[in-house]
Amino acid sequence: MRAFLSADFLLQTETAKRLYFDYAASMPIIDYHNHLPPDEIASNKTFDNLYAIWLKGDHYKWRAMRANGVSEEFITGSADDYTKFRHWAATAPYTIRNPLYHWSHMELKNPFGVTDLLSEQTAEKIYRDCNAQLPQLSTQSLLQHYKVEALCTTDDPVDSLEHHRAIAKQPFGTRVLPTFRPDRAMAVDNPATFNQFVDQLSAVTNKDIHKFDELLEALESRHTYFHEAGGRLSDHGLNTFYFTPASVTELDTIFQRARQQQAVTPHENAQFKTAVLLAVCRWNHARGWAQQFHVGAIRNNNSRLLQRIGADAGVDSIGDWNVADAMSSFFDTLDKSDQLAKTIVYNLNPAYNEVFATMAGNFQDGTIPGKIQYGSGWWFLDQKDGMEKQMNTLSNMGLLSRFVGMLTDSRSFLSYSRHEYFRRILCNLLGNDVEQGELPNDVAWLGKMVQDICYNNAKAYFGF
C-alpha cells in the first residue's frame, strides 16, 4: 500500500517516475489562460488568512459545501472567515474521490508544507500554521515559487489594462499579459449586459456607436490597445459554436433592437454572434494572435443563487448543444480566406471529445506544428479521468506530442498545483504504456516529448 500524496503520487511505474522527476518536475510554467486578478499581482498583495487566499471566490469548493449540507451563511454569507474555513475543513473528508480532495491537499503541501489531512479536527492547526506563512507568500512571490514564466489574465475589452502596464514597468520575473475576452460585445440575447457594454465601449473609445459597423470599429480599436499592451490572445466563452450569416442591414436591425431593450430571436442571436466572432478572429489572424474557444457550459442555472451572489456562484454545469456543423462552417469560412489564426478549442461535454479532436485535425495547414489545438480538460473535465480521456482522444485523433499542455483557468494563486497534477498524470500515462510494451523504452525521446507538452510547445506556439 502506498502512502497518500507521497513523492510518487499518481506515478504507478518506474518509467513514469523517471519521466516525471528527470524531465517534467522542474520545467517552468506558461499559464496561457487564467482568471487571476491583475491588480493583486501589480500590488504584490498578501492575504489576511487562509480563507482569503484559498476559499474566498472558489466556486468549486462552494459546490462541494452545498452538496454536503452546509448553509449558504457559512459559504458566501456573513459568517467570519475562520468559521467559513472550518465548514470547508469539515466538508473536505467527504470530497474523497472528487478532484477537490487531491487539489486541496496538494495546495496545502505546496507551498505551505502541510501534510496533515484536512478535517474539522485539524482545521484550527492548519489555519494557524498556514496563516503564519502568509506574510511571506505575496502574489508575486507565489508566482516565482511555482516558476511561472508567463501568465495571461482574462480581460474585458473596456479594461484600462493599467495593472498590466504597471507590472511591465516594474518586472518581477513573471510576464503578465492580457487576454481579449469580448463576450459582452455579442450578448444581444441579454440586452442589459449588452447595453452596459456598448455604453462603456463608447466612453472608453470616445466614439459614438449607433450601428453595427461602429460597434466593430470601436471594438477593433480596443483590440489594437490590447496588442500594444502585450496581448496576443483572445478568448471566447460560448454555449455552442455559431454560424448563421447575415447582411449588414440585418445586423443593424438586431443592434437597434438590442439597444432598445427588445428581445432578439434565437436566429438573430446566432447571426449577431457569428458576425462579431468572425470579425475578432480576422483581427487575430492579422495581428498574429492565437484564439481560444471555451464551449459547452450552461451557466447560472440557479436563479436564486444568481440573484443572491451573482455570476460565478458555482451553479454552472455541462450543456448539450449540437456543435459540429456550425464549428465546421465557422472555421472553414476563415480558412477559405486564409484568415484562420492559431486556435485552441476546449470542450466541456465529454460526449463531444472526438468531435472536437477530429475537427481540429480538419484545419491544420502545415504552417506550424499543432496550429489548431484540441485543448486540455476544462472545468468539470479538469481532473484525472478528464485529463486522461482528453489526452487519449488527442493521441488517437491527432498528435499528443504537439499539445500545448495545461493551464490553470483559476482565480486562485494556489492553483498552480494543477500543473503538477497534470504533469504527473501525463508521465504516468506514458510510463504505463512503456511498461506494458505499448511504447518503446526510449526514455530520452519520451522525456523530450514530456518537456515539450509541459512547456516548450506553449513557448513556441504563443511566442510571448
Image (cartoon, rainbow, N blue to C red):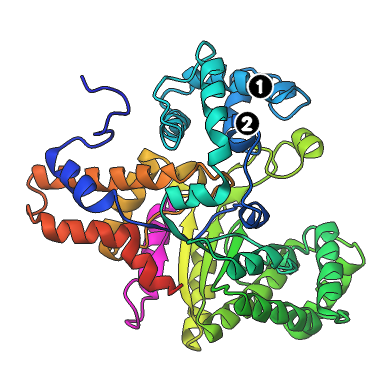
The spot of residue 26 in percent (x, y) is 29, 51
Query: Which image quarter: residue 306?
Result: top right
Q: Residue at x 63, y 38 (%)?
A: 47
Query: Which image quarter: residue 120?
Result: top right
The spot of residue 7 in percent (x, y) is 26, 33
Q: Does the magenta stretch include residue 361?
A: yes
Q: Which one is nearer the viewer's eye here, 272 or 395? A: 395
Where does the N terminus fall, quadrant-wise? top left
Mark 1, residues whose alpha carbon is within 10 Å: few (<14), some, or many (≥20)?
Answer: some
Q: Which residue lies furthest to the top in this view?
A: 121
Disc 2 marks a residue whose amino acid type is Asn
The spot of residue 373 in percent (x, y) is 40, 66
Region of the chain picked out in magenta, as a range: 351-377
Disc 2 versus disc 1: nearer the observer: 2
What mark, if any, has residue 90 been given in the picture? none
User: In the rendered view, does 116 fall on the left or right side of 55?
Assistant: left
User: In the rendered view, does 358 fall on the left or right side of 79?
Assistant: left
Q: Which one is nearer the viewer's eye here, 305 or 91? A: 91
Which residue is identified by label 2? Answer: 49
Which residue is identified by label 1? Answer: 82
Query: What's the CA distance linking mark 2 and mark 1?
Result: 8 Å
How many callouts does the rendering have? 2
Q: Which one is nearer the viewer's eye here, 213 or 132? A: 132
Q: Residue at x 75, y 34 (%)?
A: 305
Q: Which residue lies furthest to the bottom in this view?
A: 337
- Asked if residue 331 shows in the view, the reply is yes
SS of the residue under disc 1: helix
Do callouts 2 and 1 mark residues in contact (Cβ within 8 Å)?
yes
